[in-house]
Image: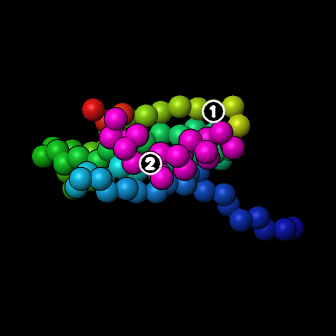
Amino acid sequence: MLKRKNKSRFISKSLKISGVTFTVTLWGYTRKRVFIGRQYYEQVGGLYGWETRRIYDKTFETEEEAKATANDFYLNPEKILKLSK
């Protein structure tokens, strides 16, 4: 029986813009869902007080569209700043 390597459920990259950490994530085994999260510190809850707030969440028809959108956000961080305001 052949062993297959397990495919991870997500691919994510982190960006730090003006001291705020954003993560651009391709989600799912088919990589068709893109979301952007912003991390902030909250006194109560989360992992050591860190919480994540989603500022963008969209599912695409094809994996290529999703990858192009995620790369566009990663290469143009000013688009992320416009979404977070």
> How far apart, in angstroms, are the residues tagged by discs 1 and 2?
20 Å
State yes or no: discs 1 and 2 in contact (Cβ < 8 Å): no
Coloring scheme of the render?
Answer: rainbow
Question: 74 or 8, which is in the foreground?
Answer: 74
Image location (x, y in percent) of residue 13: 46, 57
**Label annotation for residue 36:** none
Find residue 33 and report its image quarter: top right
Q: Of circles 1 and 2, which is in front?
A: 2
Prevailing SS of the magenta stretch = helix
Image quadrant of residue 69? top right
> How many numbered discs sit on the rendered protein?
2
Question: Is residue 72 in the magenta section?
Answer: yes
SS category of the residue bearing label 2: loop
- Farthest residue, direction left: 43
Q: Is residue 4 magenta?
A: no
Q: Position of residue 20 (x, y in %)?
A: 25, 51
In the picture, measured across the screen, residue 61 lies left or right of residue 39, that is right
Q: Residue at x 22, y 55 (%)?
A: 19
Q: Quadrant of the C terminus?
A: top left
**Which mark is drawn over residue 60?**
1
Sequence-first disc among 1 and 2: 1
Determine the residue positioned at 65% across, 39% down: 65
Between 52 and 21, the residue placed more toward the observer is 21
Left or right for 40, reference 32? left
Q: Residue at x 68, y 60 (%)?
A: 6
Please give the range of residues in magenta: 63-82
What amino acid is at disc 2?
Asn
Near mark 2 (Cα within 10 A), the count class, few <14, some 14-19 or many ≥20, is few
Above or below: residue 14 compared with residue 60? below
State whether residue 80 is above or below residue 7: above
Amino acid type, mark 1: Phe
Q: Which residue is mark 2?
A: 76
